[in-house]
Image (tube, rainbow, N blue to C red):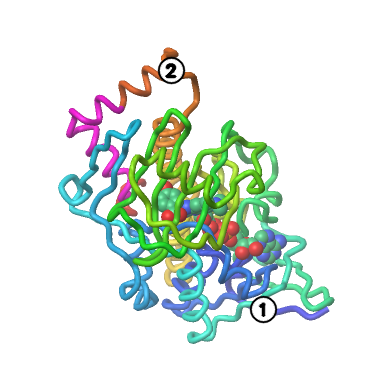
Amino acid sequence: METIRTQVGIIGAGPAGLTLALLLEKQGIQSVIIENRSREYVENRVRAGLLEYNTVEVFDNLGAAERLHQEGLVHHGCYISYNGKSQHIDFAKHTQKEVTIYGQQEVVKDLIKACSERGIDILFEAEATQIEGCESENPVIHFTYKGENLSIACDFVGGCDGFHGLGRKTLPKESYNEFKIEYPFSWLGILAHAVPSYEELIYAYHSNGFALASLRSEKISRLYLQVDNDDSVANWSDEKIWDELENRLGIQLNRGEIFEKSITPMRSFMIDNMQYGRLFLAGDAAHIVPPTGAKGLNLAVADVSALANGLIQFYQSSEQTLLDNYSRKCVARVWRVQDFSNFMTYLCHKQSDEGSFESLLQKSKFDYLTISEAYQKTIAENYVGFPFDTFN
Ligand code: RFL
Ligand code: PHB
């Protein structure tokens, strides 16, 4: 059985694993990434679209943001609306920061390209099957590749393998507490060849349910509708989707060909420990937030930035303080993001009959939003993201 030797073995070529490998390479630290899907699959997986300024800064520092700056759309605010009445949230005024709209699959393409230009090995269609020796100084990742059983012998393992990965399952159950909410609604998301008729994102509460108007470019609209968990795309003709989006958003949309339609359940999930010996979890492997706060990818990048700093410190000075603090520091940020994502989810989704106590509290939050700069600022500062050194 062939063994590959490297410094950091990384499982998963999503945003977390790819960014980690590039951050390490910049400081001369070697890594190998294994990814169970094909390159084509990960480069075309439709997911997030909104990058915090922090995230953009990381890609800038890696020299992997050239196309992002050419094609990404910088947004200085968004709208939150209640049954058609809209409140603008001005990020520039409240935070002097902005966010960038750029599809996750484009981020992944750029990062894979940067990895291959810099000689970072990514083995696609290579599935990690076991992580051994996490408590020793020589952990080993076992994996299958082209019908063979292979392994990576390394100093550290980056468990960047997403929600269903092996990393979290390798942590001893008694080493963490698990927290989760499964929401009683899902998102039906579409991508359409349609020029967006709105300039900034619109998060809309409506008595029929939540809707979100987002975009991917000046020609591609990305929109979402709250649906029941047992709903199916077969129940949603293109016409019904456009009608319902216009109804909930309270604006006229440019209708174009819908080329992607899928339903995603909404959940909040986290564990309060992200390390077991020399195995470090990052990104969706350790936490999931409902997409209403647009934070999943951004959290993944924040995690690996902290992890890379810890590994760099270790290799440069043999000190481990940053690695020792990794989990605590990340978990503190995750809690802040969990709260914001949960807040946005409950603020904007239909959960109870109009006129009920809960729905009137929800309405009162919107009324407050229209009169309070402080409330707007709270949303703005969470939305654009806190600097990486905020949580220590
Ligand atoms: P990923 O992207 O899931 O990557 C993990 C990778 O690990 C591989 N893998 C394995 N490889 C080898 N061996 C194994 N045993 C393996 N097991 C798994 C997987 O194939 C995969 O390639 O996790 P990562 O890197 O942590 O990145 C997280 C983000 O992908 C995720 O948080 C975001 O997409 C969430 N999200 C959003 N985040 C934002 O920041 N802004 C947004 O606007 C936003 N919108 C969204 C979203 C997620 C959505 N969905 C579909 C869940 C909108 C939606 C609809
Ligand atoms: C997206 O463009 O896919 C998107 C934007 C904002 C969100 C969630 C998803 O909150």
Please name the residue shown 39% across and 76% down the image: 64
Q: Nearer the N terminus, badge 1 or badge 2?
A: 1
Relative to 174, 303 lies left or right = left
Q: Quadrant of residue 97?
A: bottom left
Question: Is there any visible trace of residue 139 in the rendered image?
Answer: no
Q: Which of marks 1 and 2 is in front?
A: 2
Vertical side of 28 occupied by 271: above or below: above
Relative to 181, 85 lies left or right = left
Magenta stretch contains residue 8: no
Q: Describe the element under mark 2 as helix, strand or loop.
A: helix
Q: Mark 2 points at which residue?
A: 358
Vertical side of 250 occupied by 5: above or below: below
Relative to 166, 225 lies left or right = left
Point out the stretch of residues depicted in magenta: 366-385
Q: What residue type is labelled 2?
A: Glu
Could you give the CA–CA distance between mark 1 and mark 2, rounded to whole angstroms?
A: 57 Å
Q: In which quarter of the image is the N terminus?
A: bottom right
Give the dominant element type of the magenta stretch: helix, strand or loop. helix
Q: Which amino acid does label 1 sit on?
A: Arg
Q: In which quarter of the image is residue 70?
A: bottom left
Please name the residue shown 66% across and 48% down the image: 234
Q: Which label is found at residue 238?
A: none
Residue 62 drawn at (x, y percent): 38, 74
Residue 66 drawn at (x, y percent): 34, 78
Residue 105 vs residue 333, the one in the foreground = 105
Relative to 385, 88 lies left or right = left
Q: Name the residue under label 1.
A: 5
Q: Describe the element under mark 1 as helix, strand or loop.
A: strand
| Mark 2 nearby-residue class (10 Å; few <14, some 14–19, many ≥20) | few
- Work out which residue is located at the far left of the displayed protein and give it: 93
